[in-house]
Image (cartoon, helix red, strand yellow):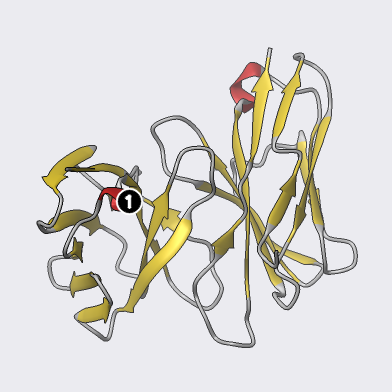
């Protein structure tokens, strides 16, 4: 399978705990995006990387959130001191700059439930 | 500030008929528009896109129409099939690898 993969698919945690999600993009894609989706809404942009550089962060990304893409391949999204309002589907997407394409290809998402 | 709007939360059509999903946007900086389909417990799947220099793009059963002056686009699915039942999201971007701004989605149900 050469699509975008995310791990874990589901995460249940208690309020105040830290969680980390991983995304593996399509191998030749140099751009990687994180989005968050809540019930009844479309995905909302969080941040994006071109190779290992984090180029844009949404104001939705509070200081409890941090994302990395250390070697320009996989990425991690960490949420510290989780709150119930963090419960959502976290989606990762990738795209290729070199092909000039605008389409972003999404992974299956990680569903986070904060109790 | 909802820059991309899908005003119909749901749509029901009969198998074989045409499905028309609508989307409006407010940001004049958007240059590319995309449609995604989403099944429950899966990520969005890219369907079709259109550049602002075009007014129509077709791919098999899917056609997207863009009316730039009205800031409106629509997705036509002909003929509709039961497997098309899903949530459809309209998205827009200024292009160049920028973020996508999504609408709230339309739940399409294709009935036998």
Rendered residue at 13%/46% (across/down): B13
Residue B27 versus residue B34: which sits nearer the camera? Answer: B34
Q: Secondary structure at mark 1?
A: helix
Rendered residue at 84%/27% (across/down): A18
What x and y, as percent, mark residue A101?
Answer: 52, 81
Q: Is residue A18 left or right of residue A91?
A: right
Residue B37 visible in the displayed image:
yes
Q: How many labels, in total?
A: 1
Q: Is residue B18 left or right of residue A49?
A: left
What x and y, as percent, mark residue B53?
Answer: 27, 86
Rendered residue at 81%/29% (across/down): A80
Q: Is residue B74 left or right of residue A9?
A: left
Q: Say few, some or many: other residues with alpha carbon within 10 Å of mark 1 (under 14 / 14 to 19 / 20 or more).
A: few
* Residue linked to disc 1: B83
Residue B39 versus residue B65: which sits nearer the camera? Answer: B39
**Residue B107 position by quadrant:** top left
State whether residue A20 is above or below residue B19. above
User: Split into 4 quadrants, where in the image is the C terminus of chain A?
Assistant: top right
User: Split into 4 quadrants, where in the image is the N terminus of chain A?
Assistant: bottom right
**Residue B104 position by quadrant:** top left
What x and y, as percent, mark residue A60?
Answer: 59, 40
Q: Is residue A103 left or right of residue A22?
A: left
Residue B30 visible in the displayed image:
no
């Amino acid at each position: 399978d050469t699509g975008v993969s995310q791990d874990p698919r589901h995460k249940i945690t208690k309020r105040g705990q830290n969680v980390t999600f991983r995304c593996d993009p399509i191998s030749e894609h140099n751009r990687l995006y994180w989005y968050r989706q809540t019930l009844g809404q479309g995905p909302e942009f969080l941040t994006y990387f071109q190779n290992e550089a984090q180029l844009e962060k949404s104001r939705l990304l509070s200081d409890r959130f941090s994302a990395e893409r250390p070697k320009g391949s996989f990425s991690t999204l960490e949420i510290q001191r989780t709150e119930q309002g963090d419960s959502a589907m976290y989606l990762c997407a990738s795209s290729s700059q070199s092909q000039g394409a605008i389409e972003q290809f999404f992974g299956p998402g990680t569903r986070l439930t904060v109790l | 500030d909802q820059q991309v709007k899908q005003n119909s939360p749901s749509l029901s059509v009969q198998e074989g008929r045409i499905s028309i999903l609508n989307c409006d946007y407010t940001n004049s900086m958007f240059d590319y528009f995309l449609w995604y389909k989403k099944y429950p417990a899966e990520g969005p799947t890219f369907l079709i896109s259109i550049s602002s220099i075009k007014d129509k793009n077709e791919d098999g059963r899917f056609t997207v129409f863009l009316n730039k002056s009205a800031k409106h686009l629509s997705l036509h699915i002909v003929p509709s099939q039961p497997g098309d039942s899903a949530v459809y999201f309209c998205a827009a971007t200024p292009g160049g690898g920028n973020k996508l701004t999504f609408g709230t989605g339309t739940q399409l149900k294709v009935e036998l």
